[in-house]
Image (cartoon, grey):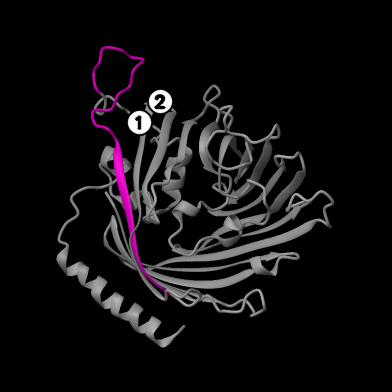
């Protein structure tokens, strides 16, 4: 990283950490904490990463197991209408100072980088909605991304859940929206083909079922998706771009708080002229907690596309590989260290190859206000398609209320 880039980052750290002395109280907390009058630490290792209780809360349809809404709802004289006393809203805002080596702009003040309006509430026992709206993302109004309804224990009290709406097909691996690093999960977002398919947002109906075999917990997911993302409807008001639906699923085993799983995604897509690309992504993931609070997690995926460029006479199939390993370690009160190693390899597309290592230290000024410092090193070899090392430094301020 060039010397002036490092000095700019250090100067930004000095300036921004001075904010701590100016803030004496955060008066508002996010929607779930406000509803239940609980601290964010009940559900989070640190915002936005959930702990085991937070994961169980989400898996239970964003409701506590013995929820009693009587004190939270309006009395409208109709038992089949549940309206909360207050509109459940929350806001998250991210701002960054960023320095990088791979563009002509070496230093950039990205404030705000994103602003979200979030809402979630029960519609009745075991049925809830969740959505958020991007007021500002990298200078644009993005609109709605996550937006879904959860039916918890959907069949006669059995732990069979249904989620319908817009969310990410990789949520059952490692949700990108809950990562602590600015650095993304590269393979999930890499555009390997001209298909609309990504390992990110789509319109989906997803079933999940959990049961125990002795001391081992078993989770099974099965889902169907349009397969072409969450773009706007066409002139016929269809969201899907062809007649095909894509399918994905996962099986996970949990024992003593340690989890291993296996993920699979299969789909196909036609372009406007009827040329087809068929593809799949498969691979294992793991999530281990060591020494009570040292969390190690990761995922490896192998993929194949039969015709990623939609050619009339396609060449050979294109293989791809994606991998990530992360560490989350709350090493002191109010401090979390995170590390992320991830990379991509695409056969015949060296311009898409990537390999990075990231270190992040986050300090929580308040439970819902944090400062983070992050460095990402580009450790991929230099090639004609990758002539410049893409190092990045980030100083961030993230708040939610």
The x and y percentages for residue 143 are: 41, 42
Extreme residue in the top direction: 77
Q: Residue at x 73, y 49 (%)?
A: 280
Are the residues flagged by discs 2 and 1 in contact, CB closer than 8 Å?
A: yes
The first of marks 2 and 1 along the sequence is 1
The x and y percentages for residue 354 are: 61, 69
Quadrant in the picture for residue 186: bottom right
> Viewed as shown, does residue 266 lie left or right of 341?
right
Residue count near mark 2 (Cα–Cα under 10 Å), binned few <14, some 14–19, many ≥20:
some
Residue 252 in view of the camera = yes
Q: Residue at x 34, y 80 (%)?
A: 8
The x and y percentages for residue 102 are: 51, 75
Residue 298 in view of the camera = no
> Viewed as shown, does residue 292 lie left or right of 75?
right
Check residue 95 for magenta coloring.
yes
Residue tagged by mark 2?
Answer: 125
| The one of 286 and 346 positioned closer to us in this rendering | 346
> Viewed as shown, does residue 234 lie left or right of 5?
right
Q: Secondary structure at mark 2?
A: loop
Residue 276 position (above or below residue 7): above
Check residue 340 for magenta coloring.
no
Residue count near mark 1 (Cα–Cα under 10 Å), binned few <14, some 14–19, many ≥20:
few
Extreme residue in the bottom direction: 3
Q: Residue at x 28, y 56 (%)?
A: 367
Quadrant in the picture for residue 57: top left
Residue 387 position (above or below residue 32): below
Q: Secondary structure at mark 1?
A: loop
Quadrant in the picture for residue 371: bottom left
The x and y percentages for residue 149 are: 47, 31
Residue tagged by mark 1?
Answer: 67
Spatial CA span between label 2 and label 1: 8 Å
């Amino acid at each position: 990283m060039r010397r002036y880039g490092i000095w700019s980052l250090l100067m930004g750290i000095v300036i921004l950490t001075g904010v701590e002395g100016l803030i004496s109280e955060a008066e508002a907390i996010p929607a779930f904490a406000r509803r239940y009058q609980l601290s964010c630490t009940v559900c989070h290792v640190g915002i936005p990463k959930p702990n085991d209780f937070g994961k169980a809360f989400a898996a239970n349809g964003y409701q506590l197991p013995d929820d009693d809404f009587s004190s939270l709802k309006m009395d409208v004289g109709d038992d089949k209408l549940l309206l909360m006393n207050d509109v459940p809203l929350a806001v998250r805002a991210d701002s960054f100072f960023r320095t990088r080596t791979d563009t002509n702009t070496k230093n950039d003040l990205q404030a705000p980088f994103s602003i979200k309006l979030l809402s979630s509430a029960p519609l009745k026992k075991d049925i809830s909605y969740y959505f958020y709206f991007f007021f500002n993302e990298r200078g644009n109004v993005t609109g709605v991304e996550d937006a879904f309804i959860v039916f918890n224990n959907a069949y006669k009290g059995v732990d069979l859940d249904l989620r319908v709406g817009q969310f990410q097909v990789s949520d059952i691996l490692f949700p990108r929206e809950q990562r602590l690093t600015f650095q993304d999960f590269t393979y999930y977002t890499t555009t390997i083909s001209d298909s609309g398919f990504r390992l990110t947002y789509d319109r989906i109906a997803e079933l999940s079922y959990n049961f125990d075999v002795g001391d081992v917990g078993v989770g099974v997911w099965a889902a169907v998706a349009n397969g072409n993302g969450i773009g706007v409807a066409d002139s016929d008001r269809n969201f899907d771009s062809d007649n095909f639906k894509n399918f994905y699923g996962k099986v996970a085993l949990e024992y003593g708080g340690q989890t291993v799983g296996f993920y699979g995604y299969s789909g196909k897509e036609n372009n406007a002229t009827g040329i087809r690309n068929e593809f799949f992504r498969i691979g294992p993931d793991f999530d281990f907690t060591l020494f009570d609070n040292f969390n190690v997690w990761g995922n490896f995926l192998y993929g194949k596309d039969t015709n990623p460029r939609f050619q009339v006479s396609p060449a050979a199939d294109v293989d791809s590989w994606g991998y990530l390993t992360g560490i989350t370690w709350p090493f002191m009160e109010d401090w979390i260290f995170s590390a992320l190693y991830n990379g991509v390899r695409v056969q015949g597309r060296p311009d898409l190859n990537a390999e990075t290592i990231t270190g992040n230290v986050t300090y929580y000024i308040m439970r819902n206000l944090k400062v983070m410092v992050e460095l990402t090193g580009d450790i991929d070899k230099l090639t004609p398609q990758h002539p410049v090392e893409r190092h990045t430094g980030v100083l961030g301020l993230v708040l939610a209320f």
